[in-house]
Amino acid sequence: MDFWEEIFADLEKREDIHRIKKLILFTCHDFWADENYDLDATPIGELIQEMLEIIPTLDKLKEMLNSHVKKLNKQAEYFLAADAIIDTLGPVYAQRNATEENSADLLAEMAESTTVSDDTSAEVIYYEDSEYDYHKLATGKKLDYIPRPFDLRAEIARQVSPLQAKILLFSALHFRFNPQDRDWSAISAYILDDLLLQLFKKCDTFAVLEKKLEDTASKLPNPDENRYVAAVIAGAMKHLYEGA
């Protein structure tokens, strides 16, 4: 049994597992799972992975859990559920913090030998583009930020795993990431919102964005599955380009 399987198995054994799942859904999406919601059909693994994507630090996790529990009637029971979540994810956040410095050093070294392709000094692109010239499609103007990023993230997360989306976006922006043979430290330095914003800034038109995602998906393991992820991301972001 690997690290994640052990975490998920320990949580699934808890008598308050439904309460834990409800609290995660409420904290991440402000959505309350009532008696009509099938909690048993919602894997705890997906919820935990999503929580790690949405909430970047342990302090932020504690803050958000605390504020959401205070909105509930049975606060004593849900504070116990919150403690279980914090105890479970505390070591994960600690490991993430330890790897972020190494990841930053790695990306800095790569940046030294990479030419930035645009005027945005904060963005360094490592991905090896195909011969297709994406920028030939670029016309018009658009926003330089994503309005209501939570809604965008939630729409994507309803259809595909946030981790799958993150791997595809990271690969489109930096280098092709293979979960089987690469260190996870580089990708763990990013949250999903940051990657969506980087891609939006890089792609001047929807056609550029769609082509970029399609090309990236075709070069990753399980290309058919990744093409579906690409289509979901593109579909969710299409409205950002309307009127541009």
Image (spheres, helix red, strand yellow):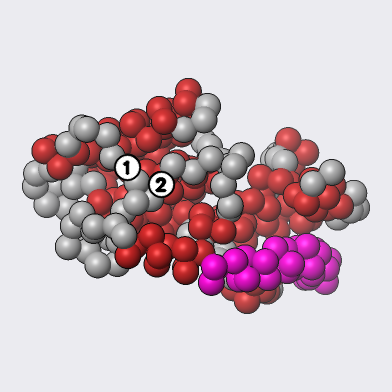
Q: Is residue 88 above or below residue 49?
A: below
Where does residue 25 sit, x and y in percent of width and height? Answer: 64, 53
Is residue 223 shown left or right of residue 88? left
Please count the marks in the image. 2
- Whether residue 148 appears in this view of the structure is no
Where does residue 207 sit, x and y in percent of width and height? Answer: 21, 35
Q: Does residue 96 show up magenta in the picture?
A: yes
- As drawn, the label of residue 175 is 2
Amino acid type assigned to the residue bearing label 2 in the image:
Phe
Q: Residue shown at 79%/68% (left/top)?
A: 87
Upstream in the sequence, badge 2 or badge 1?
Answer: 1
**Which residues lie in the magenta part?**
74-102
Where does residue 96 sit, x and y in percent of width and height? Answer: 62, 65
Amino acid type assigned to the residue bearing label 1 in the image:
Glu
Where does residue 43 sit, x and y in percent of width and height? Answer: 72, 41
Q: Residue shown at 9%/44% (left/top)?
A: 139
- As drawn, the label of residue 128 is 1
Q: For the N terminus, which image quadrant?
A: top right
Identify which residue, 106 or 117, lies in the foreground: 106
